[in-house]
Image (tube, rainbow, N blue to C red):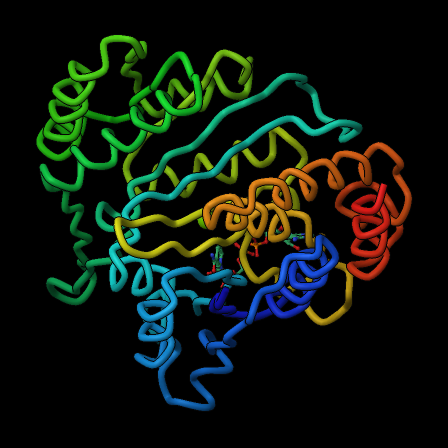
Amino acid sequence: MHIVLIPGDGIGPEVTAAAKEVIAATGTHIDWIEAPAGLAAVEQFGDPLPESTLDLVRKYRVALKGPCTTPVGKGFRSINVRLRQGLDLYASIRPVKTLPHVKVPFTDVDIVVVRENTEGLYAGLEHEVVPGVVESLRIITKPAAERIVRYAFEFARHHDRRRVTFCHKADVMRLSDGLFLQCARQVADDFPFVEFEERHIDNVCMELALDPTKFDVLVMENLFGDVISDLCAGLVGGLGLVPGANLGSRYAVFEAVHGSAPDIAGKGLANPIAVIRSAAMMLEYIGKRSAAERIERAVCKTLEAGVGLTRDLGGDGTTRTITDALIRHLAV
Ligand code: NAI
Ligand code: MG
């Protein structure tokens, strides 16, 4: 099986290398096809997302990706936006679940964030109208709104989930979220056995802080999904833990919720669990469910044992020590 590996920037190469080791330790053989993206690709190709990288994902269809740095307010457009649009990876799926022995205020959080991944405010369509006045376009289209809500309902149905909550701000963005909401209601009609709920995004934030166990599947626009994903990651112990998948009808790119963490990059301190769990989602996607389940179990056992954990988990270990612990727990 060939899989494209995009190491990315910052902690990306460190955490994706750990994921490769853990997959190999399950006995699953993968032929990794390394493809550049991010700052390294700019130096090499003059483009942070070379067409050759997109072509490799088109050829092999599945990729594991490390985070890529996007400069703030200058330089190139977000690589992630280009990658997701270029491969039409319209659904971002982020399972957020309480893990054993991670100190957090809530137990039993089990939320899946389904984020529209191709349009909305996050697409970054901006221009200067006149000096001192800029405009950001928030494009919402009926086909994109319908397919993401449909994805959320299909996901709920296949995973025995009770409720889909559509999060919006249609009282203020009456046209754009108004259209999204209308699409959501129509799609919900096709799934009478899954409960449908519509809520204002700001209210969802408050409820998540008070009692996140109330929620099941959340579906929303791109930028809302970006913000809510980090919030939800915080509820279960932070960005070092939460995995993700970007899925389309042809291709799939698996990556953690977190970014390139420049503050700890190159120091061997990053927690690789988020990208390792993204790799487990990838293994499940390619039909290697038992290897995926073994990795998930090893993550739980590693947290339970509490040895070699990285600083974000309250330990004094490194990427190396936690990867070794994960590999040890795969064996038992
Ligand atoms: P970030 O997620 O990189 O870091 C936020 C905080 O969480 C930092 O203190 C960092 O040290 C910590 N953190 C993140 N991942 C961690 C891990 N695995 N282990 C331990 N600690 C971890 O977010 P930030 O700082 O907003 O963005 C940094 C860069 O990453 C930016 O250039 C941004 O555009 C990019 N980014 C890329 C993403 C992607 O490629 N999918 C996603 C999010 C951000
Ligand atoms: Mg984000």
Q: Residue at x 25, y 47 (%)?
A: 121
Q: How many marks?
A: 0
- Between residues 61 and 66, which one lies in front from this camera angle? 61
| Residue 88 versus residue 218 in the image, above or below | below
- Between residues 310 and 245, which one lies in front from this camera angle? 245
Side (left or right) of 257 relative to 81: right
- State whether residue 30 appears in this view: yes
| Residue 68 versus residue 312 in the image, above or below | below
Residue 270 figure quarter: bottom right
Side (left or right) of 314 relative to 239: right
Residue 144 percent location from the top left of the image: 17, 41
Q: Quadrant of ligand 1?
A: bottom right
Residue 304 percent location from the top left of the image: 84, 32
Q: Residue at x 55, y 47 (%)?
A: 288
| Residue 201 versus residue 24 in the image, above or below | above
Residue 229 percent location from the top left of the image: 47, 38
Residue 27 percent location from the top left of the image: 70, 57
- Between residues 112 and 296, which one lies in front from this camera angle? 296
